[in-house]
Image (spheres, grey):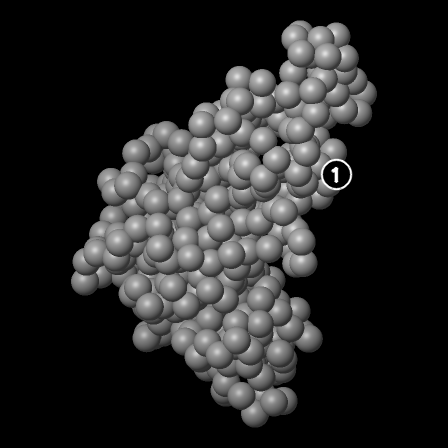
């Protein structure tokens, strides 16, 4: 964007390093299906997807058919799995673009196959079993009959059988272990029904890292790819490298006399003569208004607190204790050089995922490979 003084720096070498660490953790076991939904968790699906595939991921996962189509249009030919619900219109587009889709019921599988047949394409189906997430999928007891039906459908390929963990990030892994047991029992029933040749997959980042027995034939790491926390309760065995830094340039500094207020609602009152700087991004760009008077940003010479209420397009910080900084200085709102994503997430009572996914499309992404040396 012309003259935009706020941007997100995305270090693709960090993405590649994180993926290589995951591949090394898997050894010769599970294949890596890199999750790049939600525009690569805000990092940019296309560049992230290529970095993942270059680093050992064998396939990609998205949430929506249109996300998969966008990757195909960008030139990606490797397998792409649509994890979310796919309706009839989406099923046709998925088939036309060679996307695999998750079926959440027998009826869902039937129209996925029907729409693919209309286009003369195979229906590439992954059957979803609900083992305790209570979101999408069949019960474990229904899985064998559904898998046998899909297996027998002309033009349908049962590529996979999958589930999803509800709390694999928890320190107590009891429920995750129960879910895995339910899934394995359902898979055994499917195989007893004579269905073979499908990939089993269930593990998200936390399960992949902390439950080796859950890696199965394929795993679907997401947040770990981006160098962020898969769990707040369990330590990662390798050092994740954050890939995103949200930055902005100071556009003006004003001296606010002691006793004067700053911003909407006059929520900050200067206790001393203060150098107040304006950064040209706000909650419309993904900087939560809930950080008002609570968050801070990083400069080359130190941290500066956010002051006043965060606006839609701007926010203010107090530079009084950083005399070296002024107009043109670069602030890091989060990421390398500033507060970690985890710090913002904890302040906001949320998870790392939300912080990066909230960075809006009007923030330009600038891609770099220069922050670290390749191993």
| Above-or-below relation of 73 to 258 | below
**Nearer the observer, 156 or 97:** 97
For label 1, the crowd category at 10 Å Cα-Cα, with few meaning under 14, some 14 to 19 and many 20 or more, is some
Q: In the rendered image, which residue does mark 1 sit on?
A: 312
Residue depicted at x 68% and y 75%: 89
Residue 104: % across, % down:
55, 62
Residue depicted at x 35% and y 45%: 241
| Above-or-below relation of 192 to 369 | below
Residue depicted at x 64% and y 73%: 90
The reply to whether residue 68 is visible in this rendering is yes
The quarter of the picture where residue 106 lies is bottom right
Image quadrant containing the N terminus:
bottom right
Residue depicted at x 22% and y 61%: 29
Residue 355: % across, % down:
55, 40
**Nearer the observer, 293 or 96:** 293
Residue 79: % across, % down:
42, 74
């Amino acid at each position: 964007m012309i003259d935009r003084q706020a941007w997100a720096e995305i270090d693709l070498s960090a993405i590649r390093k994180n993926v290589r660490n995951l591949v090394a953790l898997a050894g010769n076991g599970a294949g890596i299906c890199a999750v790049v939904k939600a525009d690569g968790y805000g990092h940019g699906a296309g560049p992230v997807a290529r970095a993942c595939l270059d680093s050992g991921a064998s396939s990609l996962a998205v949430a929506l058919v249109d996300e998969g189509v966008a990757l195909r249009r960008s030139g990606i030919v490797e397998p792409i799995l649509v994890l979310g619900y796919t309706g009839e219109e989406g099923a046709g587009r998925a088939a036309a673009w060679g996307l695999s889709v998750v079926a959440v019921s027998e009826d869902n599988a039937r129209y996925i196959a029907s729409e693919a047949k209309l286009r003369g394409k195979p229906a590439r189906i992954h059957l979803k079993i609900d083992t305790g997430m209570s979101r999408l999928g069949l019960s474990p007891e229904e899985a064998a009959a559904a898998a046998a039906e899909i297996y027998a459908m002309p033009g349908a390929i049962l590529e996979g059988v999958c589930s999803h963990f509800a709390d694999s990030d928890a320190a107590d892994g009891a429920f995750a272990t129960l879910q895995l047991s339910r899934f394995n029992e359902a898979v055994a029933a499917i195989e007893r029904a004579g269905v073979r040749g499908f990939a089993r997959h269930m593990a998200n980042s936390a399960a992949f890292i902390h439950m080796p027995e859950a890696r199965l034939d394929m795993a679907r790491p997401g947040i770990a790819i981006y160098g962020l926390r898969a769990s707040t309760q369990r330590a990662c065995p390798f050092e994740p490298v954050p890939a995103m830094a949200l930055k902005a340039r100071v556009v003006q500094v004003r001296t606010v006399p002691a006793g004067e207020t700053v911003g909407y609602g006059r929520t900050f009152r200067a206790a001393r003569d203060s150098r107040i700087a304006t950064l040209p991004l706000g909650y419309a760009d993904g900087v939560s208004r809930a950080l008002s008077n609570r968050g801070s940003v990083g400069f080359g010479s130190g941290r500066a607190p956010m002051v006043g209420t965060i606006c839609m397009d701007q926010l203010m910080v107090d530079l009084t204790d950083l005399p070296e900084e002024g107009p043109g200085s670069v602030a890091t709102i989060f990421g390398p050089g500033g507060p970690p994503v985890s710090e913002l997430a904890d302040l906001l009572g949320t998870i790392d995922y939300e912080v990066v996914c909230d960075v809006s499309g009007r923030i330009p992404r600038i891609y770099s490979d220069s922050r670290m040396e390749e191993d």
